[in-house]
Amino acid sequence: MAPPADARLRLETLRLTALYGRRGVVKDVSILFPAHTVTAVIGPSGCGKSTFLRCLNRMHELSEGGWVTGRVLLDDADIYDDGVDPVQLRRRIGMVFQRPTPFPTMSIYDNVAAGLRVNGHGGRRELDAAVERALRQAALWDETKDRLRHSALALSGGQQQRLCIARALAPQPEVLLLDEPTASLDPAGTQRIEELCHELKRLYTIVIVTHNMQQAARVSDYTAFFYLGDLIEVGRTETLFTRPTQERTEAYITGRFG
Amino acid sequence: MTTRGLRRHLTSGFMTGLVALLSFLAVVSLLLILGDLVAKGASSLDWNFFTQNPVPAGQSGGGVANAIVGTLIIVGLAALIGLPVGIGTGLYLAEYGSGRLGWVVRFVADVMNGTPSIVIGIFAWTWLVRPWHFSALAGAVSLAILMVPMIARTTEEMVRLVPHSLREAALALGYPRWRTSLRIVARTALAGIVTGCLVGVARIAGETAPLLFTALGNLNFSTSILQPMQTLSLQIFTYATGPFDEWHRLAWAAALVLMGLVLLLGVAARWAIRQRDGTAR
């Protein structure tokens, strides 16, 4: 797949294999994620798409028995190199999970500021500005600006998920990983998150895992189809959905299995 | 209604009644104890009881001021030693204790939880009393040893209740593991941990056996932790087993005060938790 000529390469996996103990759950996957694009990862349950995503910010190795082979390049530097501190790395690659995970003991403000505080950004005014910026980017500012000190648990599910996006955006990561971010949301909440994807790709490189093919078609520039741990096909979204080259891709997107 | 429907209905009613009866029994026995304490002890509670020290046997009057202060000092000191160790152990077990060492620590904690308190007392006597002398410190240490496994196991349970997704969210945000444990996981489990600590402190506040040959007891007012010290539980033991009616009266009153202290501790902690959660910032 050829990225547009002007797009800078941001993230790339080279023959990435993810394993639990001896069992490979993602096999030999090479994908390019051009800067400022949205790439959707689709496939039936258990195809390894979430595990693949967790390899991109080195979360997979935190699971019991989790390890990887192959390379993941972020701006041409392998994030699995010995000198790379995974904790520092995760500050450059934000992640949002299936279910909203606001920190229950913190206020809305503190949730968004959490990633900044852990980085040592202590300046009061600086922090205020960063929190507002992140909440605006996540389209949550208008709803929360008058109750920043309230508990994050007072928000609705959809708002909580946008809060988690704001929290991930506040440290200004370069890449945003979304792991089925709308799985637990109602249609209205889903729509807002999808709109966000369109806006945020101006600033970030986004990888979104979804089991919803319509969603992939709506939000992404590129789509990767996984099946049983293998990357079956990857390409521009409209091409993959209209003229898939692989029979299994076609079978999946036309609903014949999965 | 069909026969089967009727049978289900009756079984359900019977079970509900049974459970209600059992909880009623639990509450009633507690109320009986409390009522008994109030009935027999309340009449002896006066200003002197809280401000005077014991008077020699045979004389009337006198109070348990030395025992109240002693209880506060020894229990406070035991909490100061035991809570950090217990909470730390519990955090370790929950967050990092999946390996062999964790298994060993957990096993030791469980064995210690079942160890009679008098055995702990003998241990403290061997190591702290025999080389030196009877002291409040030795008493506090034995109480601390008693509470560590209790606190550790309840802390572990509480920390394990924190959803895994919360840990992952913090780690994905670039939190180091230790900061995730303290700032996110422990903070989220705080209410449960505090409750566990409270139950632990309340448990040891009434302990008598390990204090008999560590803190020993003291007829006079003393605040030196290197000297023998009186506690309410020791005072109750002395008075209740003594021959004088006056002593028995004072024992009931002292028991009531001890119960009141434990109750106060519970209310205070609950209030503290509510304050903190109410003003989340």
Image (spheres, grey):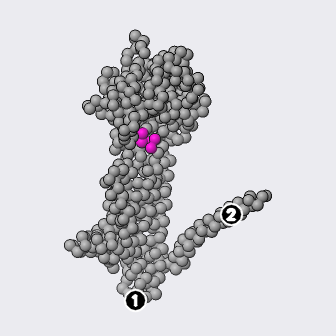
- Give the class, few, some or many, for how many residues have Cα within 10 Å of label 2's Cα (few <14, many ≥20): few
Q: Which residue lies furthest to the left in this view?
A: B131
Q: In this view, does A82 lie above or below A245?
A: below
Rendering coords of residue A242 (x, y %): 55, 16
Q: Nearer the viewer, residue B46 or B249?
A: B249
Side of B209 relative to A111 (left or right): left
Rendering coords of residue B220 (x, y %): 32, 78
Answer yes or no: is residue A103 visible: yes
Q: Residue at x 52, y 80 (%)?
A: B40
Rendering coords of residue B116 (x, y %): 37, 72
- Magenta stretch bounds: B164-168
Q: Which of A94 and B231 is in front in this view?
A: A94
**Mark 1 highlights which residue?**
B58
**Quadrant (top left/top right/bottom left/bottom right) for the C terminus of chain B:** top left
Determine contact: label 2, label 1, CB under 8 Å.
Answer: no
Q: Which residue is drawn at 60% across and 33% down?
A: A186
Give the amino acid type for the residue marked by disc 1 in the picture: Gly
Tag 2 and tag 1 share a subunit: yes
Q: Mark 2 lies on which chain?
A: B
Say which element carries label 1. Answer: loop
Q: Residue furthest front?
A: A247
Q: Residue B11 carries which label?
A: 2
Q: Residue at x 45, y 85 (%)?
A: B246
Sooner in the amino-acid sequence: mark 2 or mark 1: 2
Q: Does the magenta stretch include residue A216?
A: no
In the picture, residue A253 is in which quadrant? top right
**Quadrant (top left/top right/bottom left/bottom right) for the N terminus of chain B:** bottom right
Give the amino acid type for the residue marked by disc 2 in the picture: Thr
Say which element carries label 2. Answer: helix
